[in-house]
Image: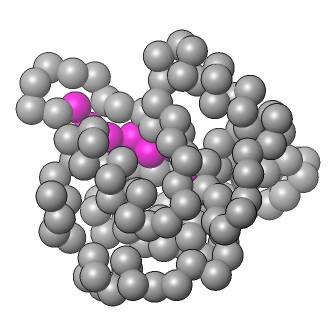
Amino acid sequence: MTRTELSCRAQRSEAALQSDVRTLLTLEKVLWYEFAPPGSRARCPRCGVVVGALGGANPPGWSDMLVILPPGDVDWPPVYIHLELKVGAGTLSADQIDWRNEIVGVGGYWHEIRRIEDMFDVLTTYGHRMRMGGP
């Protein structure tokens, strides 16, 4: 799949956006983790283990995904980026706003992703050299 093909896909739902983000991160060979919402079950894409099977291990409002970028060209630590995915008129809940503020307040990175192009922007902002082309 190319960057253009991924960018041209219509985002019908948050699940479709999440699928496209997973695809992009996997193609870019970026380390990522998808959190299971409270009360749900999700399967780890790398090892197949069911997470969240005991009612969900993450508090309400916690990020949908975590991306870990390796250190850049200088002696920096890895970059941990929390992602919240939303489509259409979707808005952040009070719990999501609280978690965003907590993460940013301790110097963490948090981004709202509404379209796949936002994910390209986040990766390049933190120095990732795109394999699929781009800036």
Q: Main secondary structure of the magenta part?
A: strand
Q: Is residue 67 one of those drawn in magenta?
A: yes
Instruction: Decide which of 114, 39 is in the foreground and name it.
Output: 114
In-front residue for pair 51/120:
120
Residue 32 forms part of the magenta stretch: no
**Residue beneath the point at 49% across and 66% down:** 115
Residue 84, x across and y down, in percent: 61, 48
Q: Nearer the viewer, residue 132 or 68?
A: 132
The furthest residue to the left = 73
* Residue 34 visible in the snapshot: no
Residue at the location (38% across, 64% down)? 117
Give the quadrant of the N terminus: bottom left
* Image position of 11 with respect to 37: above or below: below
Type of colouring: one colour
Identity of the residue drawn at 20% across and 41% down: 127
Q: Which residue appears farthest toward the top when viewing the image?
A: 106
Reply above or below: 88 against 69.
Answer: below
Which x, y percent locates residue 112? 55, 47
Residue at 85% across / 47% down in the picture?
A: 38
Q: Which image quadrant for residue 75?
A: top left
- Quarter holding residue 72: top left
- Count of numbered tags: 0
Image quadrant holding the C terminus, namely bottom left
Vertical position of residue 48 compared to residue 112: above or below: below
| Magenta highlight range | 65-71
Residue 32 visible in the displayed image: yes
Horizontal side, residue 90 vs residue 8: left or right = right
How far across and down, in percent of the image, does residue 62 sit?
71, 38
